[in-house]
C-alpha cells in the first residue's frame, strides 16, 4: 500500500477508538494489568539482582566457605536427615586448612553462622537492642569478611586464647545503645554476661541500601562464645545442628579453583573419606551462591510471565470480542467503502490497525504503571529497582503481538464482507 493510504488508515483507526473511550479503556484493561505486572516485577527483580551481586563482590568474591551443609545441598534435593548426620566443622579443621593448604592465606572459623543463628539482646544501662546475631570468631575475622572497623580495634589472638569477655559491636547495636557517645571502653551486657567494647564494625554493604539486617550482629572470641553458650566446638557431633562455618581466603594470584581443591583434599583426609565416597561437607563460594540465585530469579521471572500471560490472554480475548462487535456495527460502512473501490487489503489493514493501536496503547499504559510502581516502592522503602530497556521492549512487543493475533480474525471477517450484502445490512 502507498504510505499516504497507510497513514490515512492509521488516522481513521485513532479517530474510531477516540470516539469510544470507555469501551476502548475497558477492552485494554487486561493488557494494562499484564504489562504492569511484567514491567513492575522485572524492575524489582533486576534491581535486587544487581545489588546482590555488588554486595557479594564487596564482601569478598574469592572467599571459600566450608560448612556442614548449605542451601546448595538443599537445592540439589539431598535428604535433610542425611545432611544432618554429616560431621560439624571444628576449630581443628580450620587450623589444618591453614597448615596443610599452601594456597590459603587466611582461615577463620565462625560460630553462630551458617545455620540457626544464636541471638541475644545487648544491654547498656537502661537501653537494650532487639535480638541480634552473636558471632564467635578468631582475630582474623575482619580480614576474611573484609569489614573495616569504624572505631577501636578487633580482639587479639591472646584474648581469644584466654577467653576474654571482649566484644566488637555492629552498627545496629551502636545506634541503639550509643547514639551520641563513643562506645569503646564501655561495659555492655550480652544476655547475662558482661563484655568490654573494644571496637565497632563499619557499616556493611547491603543490597541497594535496603535494610536486610546485615548490621544486626556482635562479634566475640570463639572461645568465649563456647564458654557462654555451652558449645564444645572441638567435637564433630554428628546428628546435631551447629552453626559453624570455616572461611578461607586464597593467596593473591592463586586461582580459586586450585585453593578449593586443596581445601577439599584437607577436609576429605580429616573426615577419612575414601575415593569413591562423596564429600560430607559443602564448599560454598560467591559464584555458587549467585548461580543458585540465578536459578531462583529465573524461576520467579518465568512464573511472573506465565501469570501475566493469563491477564494478557484475557485482554486479547476482550480485544477480539470488541473488534468483532465493531465489525458488525460498521457493516454498512464497510459496504460503502468497498462500493467506492476500497480493496480487501485496505479494509483488513484498517481493522487490524485499530486492534494493534488499542493493545499498544494498553502496553504503553502498562509500562508507565509498572515503572511507576517500581519507583514508588523504591522511594517508599529503599528497595533497589532497575528499569532495563528490554523490559519496555517486551511490554510493547507483547501488546502489539496480541493486537495482531487477536485482531486478525475480525479484520479478515471485515475484509471478506460482500459489498452488496453489507449495504443491505440494517
Image (cartoon, rainbow, N blue to C red):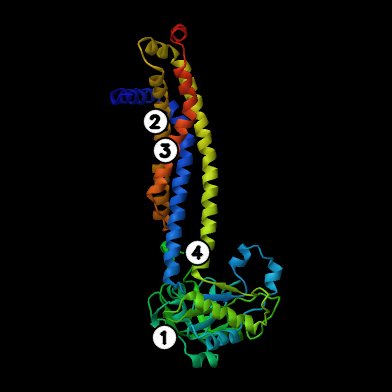
Q: Badge 4 local density, few (<14 within 10 Å), some, or many (20+)? A: some
Q: Nearer the viewer, mark 1 or mark 2?
A: 2
Residue 68 vs 412, above or below: the answer is: below
SS at badge 2: helix
Write down the residue under mark 1. 153
Whether residue 350 is visible, yes or no, is yes
Q: How far apart are marks 4 and 1 (CA)?
A: 32 Å
Q: Distance between the residues labelled 3 and 1?
A: 57 Å
Write down the residue under mark 2. 357
SS at badge 1: loop
Write down the residue under mark 4. 290
Q: Residue furthest front?
A: 275
Image coordinates for residue 86, horizontal then vertical, percent: 68, 75
Write down the residue under mark 3. 363
Marks counted in the figure total: 4
Q: Specify whether 10 is left or right of 325.
A: left
Amino acid at each position: 500500500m502507498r504510505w499516504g493510504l497507510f497513514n490515512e488508515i492509521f488516522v481513521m483507526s485513532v479517530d474510531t477508538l477516540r470516539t469510544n473511550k470507555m469501551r476502548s479503556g475497558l477492552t485494554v484493561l487486561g493488557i494494562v494489568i499484564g504489562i504492569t505486572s511484567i514491567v513492575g516485577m522485572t524492575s524489582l527483580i533486576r534491581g535486587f539482582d544487581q545489588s546482590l551481586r555488588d554486595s557479594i563482590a564487596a564482601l569478598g568474591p574469592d572467599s571459600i566457605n566450608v560448612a556442614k551443609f548449605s542451601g546448595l545441598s538443599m537445592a540439589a534435593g539431598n535428604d535433610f536427615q542425611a545432611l544432618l548426620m554429616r560431621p560439624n566443622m571444628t576449630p581443628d579443621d580450620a587450623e589444618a586448612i591453614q597448615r596443610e593448604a599452601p594456597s590459603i592465606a587466611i582461615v577463620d572459623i565462625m560460630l553462630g553462622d551458617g545455620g540457626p543463628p544464636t541471638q541475644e539482646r545487648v544491654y547498656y544501662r537502661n537501653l537494650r537492642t532487639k535480638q541480634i546475631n552473636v558471632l564467635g570468631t578468631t582475630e582474623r575475622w575482619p580480614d576474611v569478611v573484609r569489614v573495616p572497623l569504624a572505631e577501636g580495634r578487633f580482639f587479639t589472638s591472646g584474648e581469644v586464647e584466654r577467653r576474654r569477655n571482649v566484644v566488637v559491636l555492629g552498627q545496629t547495636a551502636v545506634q541503639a545503645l550509643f547514639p551520641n557517645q563513643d562506645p569503646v571502653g564501655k561495659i555492655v551486657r550480652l544476655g547475662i554476661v558482661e563484655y568490654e567494647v573494644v571496637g565497632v564494625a563499619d557499616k556493611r554493604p547491603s543490597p541497594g541500601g535496603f535494610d536486610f539486617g546485615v548490621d544486626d550482629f556482635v562479634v566475640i572470641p570463639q572461645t568465649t562464645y563456647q564458654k557462654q553458650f555451652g558449645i564444645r566446638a572441638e567435637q564433630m557431633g554428628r546428628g546435631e545442628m551447629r552453626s559453624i562455618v570455616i572461611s578461607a581466603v586464597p593467596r593473591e594470584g592463586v586461582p580459586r579453583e586450585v585453593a578449593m581443591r586443596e581445601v577439599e583434599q584437607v577436609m576429605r583426609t580429616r573426615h577419612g573419606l575414601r575415593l569413591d565416597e562423596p564429600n560430607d561437607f559443602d564448599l560454598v563460594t560467591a559464584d555458587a551462591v549467585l548461580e543458585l540465585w540465578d536459578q531462583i530469579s529465573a524461576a520467579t521471572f518465568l512464573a511472573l510471565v506465565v501469570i501475566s500471560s493469563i491477564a494478557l490472554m484475557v485482554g486479547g480475548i476482550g480485544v477480539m470480542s470488541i473488534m468483532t462487535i465493531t465489525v458488525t456495527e460498521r457493516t454498512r460502512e464497510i459496504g460503502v467503502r468497498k462500493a467506492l473501490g476500497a480493496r480487501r487489503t485496505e479494509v483488513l489493514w484498517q481493522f487490524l490497525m485499530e486492534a494493534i493501536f488499542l493493545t499498544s496503547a494498553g502496553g504503553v499504559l502498562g509500562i508507565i504503571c509498572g515503572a511507576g510502581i517500581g519507583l514508588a516502592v523504591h522511594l517508599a522503602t529503599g528497595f533497589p529497582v532497575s528499569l532495563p530497556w528490554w523490559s519496555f521492549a517486551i511490554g510493547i512487543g507483547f501488546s502489539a503481538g496480541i493486537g495482531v493475533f487477536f485482531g486478525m480474525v475480525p479484520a479478515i471477517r471485515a475484509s471478506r464482507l460482500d459489498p452488496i450484502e453489507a449495504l443491505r445490512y440494517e
